[in-house]
Amino acid sequence: MRRILLLLTILFCATGLYAESQQETLQRVKYKHGPAYIYRLTLTDKQGTGYSLEHPMRFLSRRSVERRRRQGLPLDSTDLPVSDRYIRMVERNEVVVIGQSRWQNTLLVRIPDTTVIQRISQLPFVKSCKMVWQAPDSVTPTAIKAKYHEHFEERDSVTGDPYGQTSLQTTTLMGQRLHDIGLRGETMMIAVIDGGFKNVDKIPAFQNIDIRGYHDFVTPPSPSIFAETDHGTKVLSAMALYATYYYVGTAPRASYWLLRSEDQQTEQEVEEDYWTMAAEYADSVGCDLVNSSLGYNEYDHASMSYRQWQMDGQTSFASRSASLMARKGMILVNSAGNSGMGTWKKIGVPADADHILTVGAMLADAPHKIAPFSSVGPTQDQRVKPDVVAIGAPARLVNGRGVIMDDMGTSFSAPIVCGLTACLWQALPKMTAEQVIELIRLSSSNYEHPDNIYGYGVPNFWRAYQIGRYKSLK
């Protein structure tokens, strides 16, 4: 009966989202920044970059360099910024450079028409040009102000349980045992890559979070990332909030960067470039972990969409970037996706990346049972995905109105895992990103027999801590 009720709830949510999208269609307005196109230029080399690996703190923060040094990870050519000389030569062709990826040696250029691309493609240092965005005819306005609550409802408090509404999603992973010994994310820095953080700057419950900064990578940028979608607000709450007897996140003493890469107005491949720019920014400011509750497989233009055989961690632009992150000393925790009940069913981009933690969703009322919507693996090259699973059907979250509520999705199981990963790494600072990822898999319930639904299973962070401590003492 419970499972039937859950399925009805999922269908009801889907119906609500469809109705909302229909309503938004009626509110669409003419796109005022077009016509325009964005192209990704892949360059041949970095001659004339103006930077060198001998002086990394000219382009990376001290914290970023120290993170690599601690893990014994050398810098390489992918860390160097794109050539300044090449940028100037591209800009002479009446285009606007709006972004770059040092990891993949690419530039993003915005142009009013496509005639100039033929000329740019003939430049000797341009390997390829690919259109990744085309201005839509109309869009739905975003950045809308919303009212919020100053306080949680008294009925949301749980007498005798300091975790309040988050007790189940934390204790299922044995995260409370880490908190009990003082591991709450101190010294760790987490970047949240998302689409918006509605009212995080206003809701009193968020004011005690150590937010180091924020940045918008979308072109054109939003008037305010704090007036966009509250998806990122919910994700952040699962890790960062601390309100005893009401709501306690999994890493309430970590510090956070809020990074926007998701364009709510269109769904096009350029968002992978924005995502990469956000990940590189997280690297440069010294973040230890990145939570990304985003995923892609189908775009507005069919030519940009993926096929399942491309889910190999290397075909897509974002997945190539994600697969590099452990080499930079960072742990990426990414949601698996919510396509399990649809025709796609599989994980998307960048959940297919290598050397990351991809997180699926379990039922809250039947822990260790997968949520039917949770996307499945394996990758095309037969790696186990998801890596682990956590409660996400539903998870308890705080939305952009400052209200504790239920929501479903791997978007929310991922930050629960990400926060506890930060707490674990806090206790084992000598471990590399790769070693911590493997330790979490090793501690999980399905490690001996991983599959393509649960992956390695439900992580036990207390067991991971004990194993890690034992290894560090050897």
Image (spheres, grey):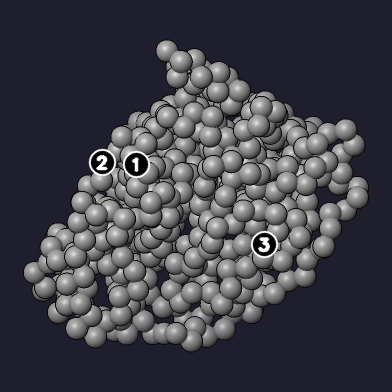
In three-dimensional space, the C-alpha distance between marks 2 and 1, rounded to whole angstroms, equals: 7 Å
**Vertical position of residue 309 compared to residue 300: above or below:** above
Give the residue pinned by disc 2.
74
- Quadrant holding the C terminus: top left
Q: Mark 1 is on which residue type?
A: Arg
Q: Quadrant of the image for the N terminus?
A: top right
Residue beneath the point at 63% across and 37% down: 184
Q: Earlier in the sequence, mark 3 or mark 1?
A: 1
Q: Nearer the viewer, mark 3 or mark 1?
A: 1
- Residue at the image position 69 percent from the left and 35 percent from the top: 169
Q: What residue sits 78% from the left and 47% below the top?
A: 243
User: Residue 200, which numbered label?
Assistant: 3
Label 2 sits on what residue type?
Pro
Q: Position of residue 411 (x, y in %)?
A: 58, 47
The numbered mark, 2 or 1, whose residue comes first in the sequence reads 1
Name which of mark 3 and mark 2 comes first in the sequence: 2
Is 166 left or right of 97, judged from the image as shown? right
Residue placed under numbered mark 1 in the picture: 68
* Visible residue check, residue 244: yes
Q: Is residue 245 above or below residue 299?
A: above
Question: Tag 3: residue type?
Answer: Val
Query: Is 242 placed left or right of 83 in the picture?
Result: right
Location of residue 207 by image quarter: bottom right
Q: How far is mark 3 from mark 1, CA to CA? A: 31 Å
The crowd level at tag 3 (other Cα within 10 Å; few <14, some 14-19, many 20+) is many
